[in-house]
Image: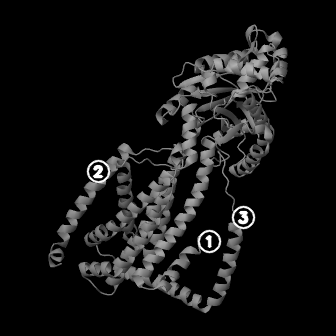
Amino acid sequence: MNFIRKHFRKLSIAAMVVVAAVTIASLFEIRKNTRFDYDFETFFPIDDPELEAYLDFRNKFEYDNEFVLLAIENSSGIFSRRFLENVQALTDSLRRIPDITQVISPTDLTYLTTAGKFPYMHIEEPERYKEDSAFIYRNEELVGSFFPPDARSLSIFIRTTNGISKEKSDLLLARMNHEISRHQFEKIHLASKLNAQKVYLDQLRKEFVLFFISSFFLIVLFLYASFRSFWGVWVPVLVVLLAIIWTLALMTRAGKTLDIMTVLLPTMLFIVGMSDVVHILTKYLEEMRRGVLNRFDALLKTIREVGFATFITLLTTGLGFLTLLNSRIIPIRDFGLYTSIGVFIAFILAFTIMPVVLSLIRLPDMRTEKISSQFWSRRLLFLLSWIFRHGKKIGVVLICVVLISAIGISKINLNNYLIEGLTTKDELRHDFIFFEKNYSGVRPFEMSITPVDPKGSVIGVNELRALDQLEQYLKTSYGVGFMISPITLVKGIHKAQYDGNPDYFTLPPDSAGVAELAAEVSKNRKRKEVKLYLSQDEKTGRMSGKMHDIGSKKIRELDKKLDSFLMTDPALKAIRAHRTGAAVILDRNNEYLVENMLQGLLLSILVVAIVISIIHRSWKMAIIAVIPNFLPII
């Protein structure tokens, strides 16, 4: 101790040099490697059987969210030669863009007949537009998918490369926007993971800066109001900023990106880390005001007296965040891990660097510090005496607030929408709403179909009859549109046998006719358009569609009715149907979030209570400590 006392100033300067070097290296690491990421698949819950089933389903067929819906408006009506030629030109240019694997446009849609393929729209023959329009709107599979009821826009369906990276997504979106801008349409609407991902990432960057700056200025105002001096502001801020920089550098070095959770980390550290700094600074000033003129002795006494209390704060806070490691969702785990590490770094810096800084800077004006201390002491003493005088009233009010809160908690609903993170000012939100109003929606619907009979086929006669029943239920009672499945392929062949007559987009009434159509599909099962909906062994089928973004709460209600329909309708005994897809996993993810939040909360309260009871050897002290922390949460 004598050696440290004797060489304290030299050691302080050496420590500041080391801190400066580490900080410079950290800033370089942050600037070079920090990335923002909004890959919603990282929020898929691990060790979930539904996730495994979805990944298997996706491997058999394709990614259900790698698509783009492009709607093009023409207020005077879509049956205009100039407009349709422009759409066709755009379609051709989109097909040349890398990472676009398929473009299905209304301008080159065809239907099969016994004589071959024929277009739905005769672009070069305007005199046939009226006839084309009447024919198109007789085909139920086209309305709501490629054509809206009002015929004032049309929709192009674009498939992109499965599992496309963020960098390629941005490049693809830029190329698409460039091609679209070249054709000067009246108005376009784009709904896809590509632009949603970009919008959310841009928002993350803005909010990262906004949160950090907001918390910074609020903390500065608090510090100035508390210490009434310039140095009382910049010293604590410096220490906490160093903790944030070091933590971000460590996170970046470990390969972790800033996502929707970790973007909150700097703000959390700023608030939590400030606690230790304020404790040290307050105690140090108290010792200096008492006349301890030797800085070393004042700092030594400060560390001895507040060190244990702040260590307990560190321990309970760190353990609280570490309880998030119990989550099934990786970003939640990462947030808990790195925040706890950041809290630990803030603690270490507060008890190493802050004493160094305080020893090197000029002594504060004790007269000003005394006035500041008296300012707060008088007001806090008055508040404390008021609390003692009105204890019963405070207790009654507290009970009333808890009861009202309990009523409020009972009214909380678990619900989520695809566009709930977007404000009314976001163009993407308006694009999504346009598809909701004019088409079948943007929420993907996926269902896996397998035959009950192990030796059976998805396109067996009984299975197809069951599929037909299920499809009708999904359209009328579940709200699914724009649906394609093995039965769509069968019905398409049946319609072709009657020269494309929409009235025959049905299953034949006789079993022999159904078996004949199924055999035709089976012959072509290696073709791409068939492989997307029927596995090669014909043991798994895919029902794929779009529906409105009605919210997960409503979806859960519809799922219960669907399950009841599947179990009770005798016509469906030939098949097993299982809902899957990215939308289903995200809905489950939100349920896990709530579950993990409650588990983490209870676990952290338990851990804190155990730690306090061990330290104070009293379970009563644990209760006293837990109650004032638990009530604000309620």
Please give the residue where the numbered disc 1 appears in the rendered image: 634
Q: Nearer the viewer, mark 2 or mark 1?
A: 1
Tell me if residue 72 can be seen. Answer: no
* Label annotation for residue 25: 2
Please give the residue where the numbered disc 3 appears in the rendered image: 411
Which numbered disc flags the more N-terminal residue, 2 or 1? Answer: 2
Residue type, mark 3 in image = Lys
Choose between 151 and 406: the one closer to the eye: 406
Q: Callout 1: helix, strand or loop?
A: loop
Q: CA distance from mark 2 to mark 1?
A: 43 Å
Residue 413 position in % (x across, y down): 69, 59
Which numbered disc flags the more N-terminal residue, 1 or 3? Answer: 3
> Where, by quadrant of the figure, is residue 602 drawn?
bottom right
Q: CA distance from mark 1 to mark 3?
A: 13 Å
> What is the tally of numbered marks visible in this picture?
3
Residue 382 position in % (x across, y down): 54, 88
| Label 1 crowd bin: few (<14), some (14–19), many (20+), radius 10 Å | few
Name, please, the residue furthest toward the top: 115
Choose between 313 and 179: the one closer to the eye: 313
Image position of 160 (left or right of 225) = right
- Are the residues at dot 1 and dot 3 in contact (C-beta closer than 8 Å)? no
Q: Callout 3: helix, strand or loop?
A: loop
Which residue is pictured at 84% across the width and 24% down the height? Answer: 509
- Are the residues at dot 3 and dot 2 in contact (C-beta closer than 8 Å)? no
Residue 240 position in % (x across, y down): 38, 63
Image position of 71 (left or right of 259) = right
Q: Is residue 208 above or below residue 483?
A: below
Residue 162 position in % (x across, y down): 53, 31
